[in-house]
Structure formats: structure tokens, C-alpha cells
Amino acid sequence: MTTVVSKIKAATANDALHHFENMLRFETDCWDVHHAITAQEVDFTLLDVRSPELFVRGHVATAINILHGKLTNHRLADFAPERLFVVYCAGPHCNGANRAAVHLARMGRPVKMMIGGIEGWKDEGFDLVTGPE
């Protein structure tokens, strides 16, 4: 029997390993970010790229707010060139984090996206901080 799932042959284990390892170079998840913050082992800068109004209503602790379109070398001058940035936006229905990642990569900055965004964070049951940074 062949189902829609198995109709297209799965990748080899080696190809799958390469693919999924590569994915982890580009993204992290809410749980890993939460763990780093809770353990106070934050070796990245967390960027909330949503509007300032949404940021004030609720954001992840330690995050700073810079709209994806406002990411410039001048605004990031205080960060070491090798500093890892983790970007997030509203969630899967928003491409702000993707846009921010593009801006950062074009500036030569290391970047990962926190998959799920703020909606994923809330889905995990993690608290938000309200108010300005």
C-alpha cells in the first residue's frame, strides 16, 4: 500500500541528517531560548522585531525591540560583530523575523530565528514581560 505520505520516497538517512542539522543553524525554538534565559546563560541578543506598541503589550524577557526595517549597522554598533542575534516576530503568520534575519545576514551578522515567535512562546506557557525594554 502507498499513501500520500510514502508516495514520495523519504530522503536517505545521510541526506536527512544534513538537512535537519542545517535547519538548526538557522533556527532555534522557544524552549531553548527560555532555558537560556532562565539559566542566565544567554549568549545571544534577542530581538523582538514587532511594533513598539506590540512590544510594550508583551515581549520575551531580555528582548530588545527594533523593527526589522530599522535594523542598521549604526543601531547595532554597540554589539560585537560576532554577536549572535535571535529574532522573533508575532509567529508563523508573520514574516518580520525572516525580514530581520535577511537584514542582519546582509550586514554580516550571525542570526537565528526563534520559530513560533511570540505566539509559540505563549503556546509553551511561558510568561511575557510588559512595558518598555
Image (spheres, helix red, strand yellow):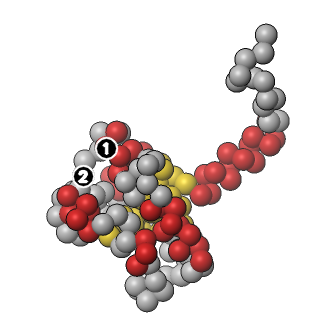
Q: Residue at x 39, y 58 (%)?
A: 89
Vertical position of residue 95 compared to residue 102: above or below: above
Quadrant containing the C terminus in the rendered view: bottom left
Q: Residue at x 58, y 73 (%)?
A: 105
Q: Residue 122: which numbered mark, if any?
A: 1
Residue 37 seen in the figure: yes
Vertical position of residue 120 compared to residue 46: above or below: above
Q: Residue at x 42, y 59 (%)?
A: 88
Vertical position of residue 133 compared to residue 127: above or below: below
Q: Residue 128: which numbered mark, if any?
A: 2
Q: Amino acid at mark 1?
A: Lys
Q: Contact, CB < 8 Å: mark 1 with mark 2?
A: yes
Q: Tag 2's secondary structure?
A: loop
Near-viewer residue (49 or 59): 49
Cα gap from disc 1 to disc 2, whole angstroms: 8 Å
Q: Tag 1's secondary structure?
A: helix
Disc 1 or 2, which lies upstream in sequence? 1
Residue 39 seen in the figure: no
